[in-house]
Image: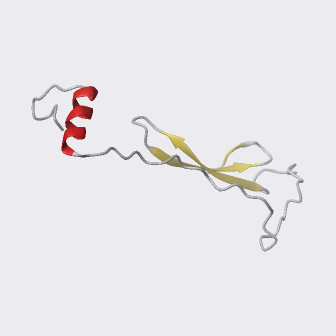
Amino acid sequence: MMRTLGHLVGRFKVRRLMKEAGLESKQPGSHAYKVARAERPDIPHLLAREFAAPQPNQVWCGDITYVVWAGGRWHYLAAVLDLHTRRVAA
């Protein structure tokens, strides 16, 4: 904000000015994702780890993940794979 107003200040000057004003910097804590410890018995496991499909468009699987995009922003990436062709279906 100081730069947008035309003031050139470094971090040490900002630190000193904040200390004089009685201000403290508070940084956000690190984020940790929850790790699944057990399988979900309420969701049926239809594939039973048999990932070979006899024909295209018979068995699909999907996944969702997060990726960091340009500018440091997080985005979702979802993909559906055809297990016969091993290609993205949707």
State the residue in front, 27 or 47: 27
Q: Is residue 80 left or right of residue 22?
A: right
State the residue in front, 46 or 73: 73
- The residue under the point 46% across, 38% down is 69
- The residue under the point 43% across, 42% down is 73
Asked where in the image residue 38 lies, by quadrant, the reply is bottom right
Q: How many marks?
A: 0
Q: Is residue 52 left or right of residue 32?
A: right
Q: How far from the left and from the top, in percent, is residue 7?
A: 12, 29
- The residue under the point 80% across, 63% down is 39
Asked where in the image residue 60 lies, by quadrant, the reply is bottom right
Q: Is residue 50 left or right of residue 26?
A: right
Q: How far from the left and from the top, in percent, is residue 54?
A: 88, 51
Q: Which quadrant is home to the N terminus?
A: top left
State the residue in front, 58 or 74: 74
Q: How far from the left and from the top, in percent, is residue 36?
A: 73, 58
Q: Is residue 17 left or right of residue 50?
A: left
